[in-house]
Amino acid sequence: MAEYDDVLLPTDGSTGTQETVDHAVTLARTHDATLHALYVVDRRRYRAADKDTQDEVIQSLEEEGERALEDVAVRARDAGVDVVTEQRDGIPYREIQEYATEADVDVLTMGTHGQTGRDRVATLGSVTERVLKGVEVPVLVVNID
């Protein structure tokens, strides 16, 4: 059986990711691994906003990230799993790939799609698809209906 010491869970806080959180927490608990929860403030979302609303959009996204990370942290701690949380600013798939390398994680756990829903029919969400193409570690993709 593969040995995992560090499990990465990128989260966007959407309700569909709850099943993915469950899988990541279970995987980390089973392997006595540290769970790394990562939220990326998608700079494309606030750069697309009007100049006079960008600060509000950034603040809203950062608060959303704090809530998402706190939810994962509470669930991990309740399951007896060590957890590290981090919020970054950037392009989600790139930040996920960079974090996976920097933290030397052993496996990622991601949903088929996040807040943006299904980007294309019968395919993975664009963030998940791009992460899969750019990391060297296994990725557990959880089907979100």
Image: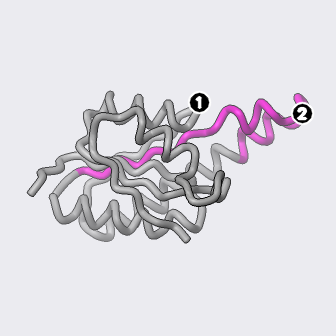
Location of mark 1 (residue): 90
Q: Compared to 115, does 137 lie above or below?
A: above
Q: Which mark is residue 50?
A: 2
Which picture quadrant has residue 14?
bottom right
The kind of residue tagged 1 is Gly
Q: Secondary structure at mark 2?
A: loop
Image coords of residue 92 (percent x, y): 55, 37
Residue sitting at x 58%, y 56%? 114
Segment colored magenta: 34-60
Q: Is residue 67 visible?
A: no
For the residue pair 75 and 44, the one nearer the viewer reads as 44
Circle 2: residue type: Asp
Left or right: residue 51 compared with residue 69: right
For residue 137, what is the image quadrant? Answer: top left
Looking at the image, is mark 2 or mark 1 earlier in the sequence?
2
Residue at 55% over, 71% down: 145
